[in-house]
């Protein structure tokens, strides 16, 4: 019953099977936080203790002279510029500039009331 006679001149041909085996490398750890660069950011934040008060005092002067909107604009523009420069250069000094703008702004500006006003629209 396993022998099937050929039909109308048809003969079975040999079948070639190719098997390709690939070996995938083992995946790294699932929770990889290497992109955060804890050591680099910690060193930059430690150095920022010196530079952030200068930036904070400059923002306080702007807030007194030109109002809250001018100070927020200056803080945001400085942060955007420092983050862009850090993205381009990736040096220790540029990371210090980023953390100086962040910590100095948080120290000099009323962050929580500004967030509440931004999210709710309430002025009280």
Image (cartoon, rainbow, N blue to C red):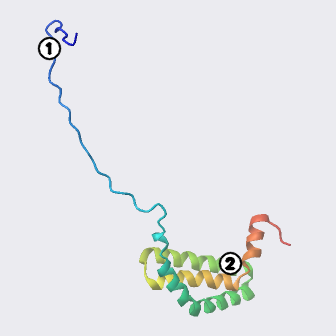
Quarter holding residue 88: bottom left
- Looking at the image, residue 11 sits to the left or right of residue 122; the answer is left
| Residue occupying image coordinates x 67% and y 81% | 106
Whether 51 is drawn above or below 5: the answer is below
Q: Residues within 10 Å of mark 1 (few under 14, many from 20)?
A: few
| Marks 2 & 1, CB-CB < 8 Å contact | no
Residue named by callout 2: 72
| Residue 96 visible in the displayed image | no
What secondary structure is marked by label 2?
helix
Q: Position of residue 112 (x, y in %)?
A: 74, 75
Q: Nearer the viewer, residue 47 or 109?
A: 47
Which is more foreground, mark 2 or mark 1? 1
Q: Position of residue 63 (x, y in %)?
A: 72, 85
| Residue occupying image coordinates x 75% and y 65% | 119
Residue named by callout 1: 11
Distance between the alpha carbons at the discs numbered 2 and 1:
84 Å
What secondary structure is marked by label 1?
loop
């Amino acid at each position: 019953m396993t022998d099937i006679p050929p039909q109308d001149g048809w003969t079975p041909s040999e079948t070639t099977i190719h098997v390709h085996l690939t070996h995938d490398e083992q995946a790294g750890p699932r929770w990889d936080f290497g992109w955060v660069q804890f050591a680099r950011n910690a060193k930059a934040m430690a150095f920022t203790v010196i530079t952030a008060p200068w930036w904070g005092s400059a923002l306080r002067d702007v807030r007194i002279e030109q109002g809250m909107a001018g100070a927020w604009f200056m803080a945001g523009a400085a942060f955007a510029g420092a983050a862009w420069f850090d993205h381009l250069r990736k040096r220790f000094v540029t990371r210090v500039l980023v953390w100086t703008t962040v910590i100095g702004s948080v120290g000099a500006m009323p962050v929580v009331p500004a967030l509440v006003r931004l999210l709710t629209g309430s002025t009280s």
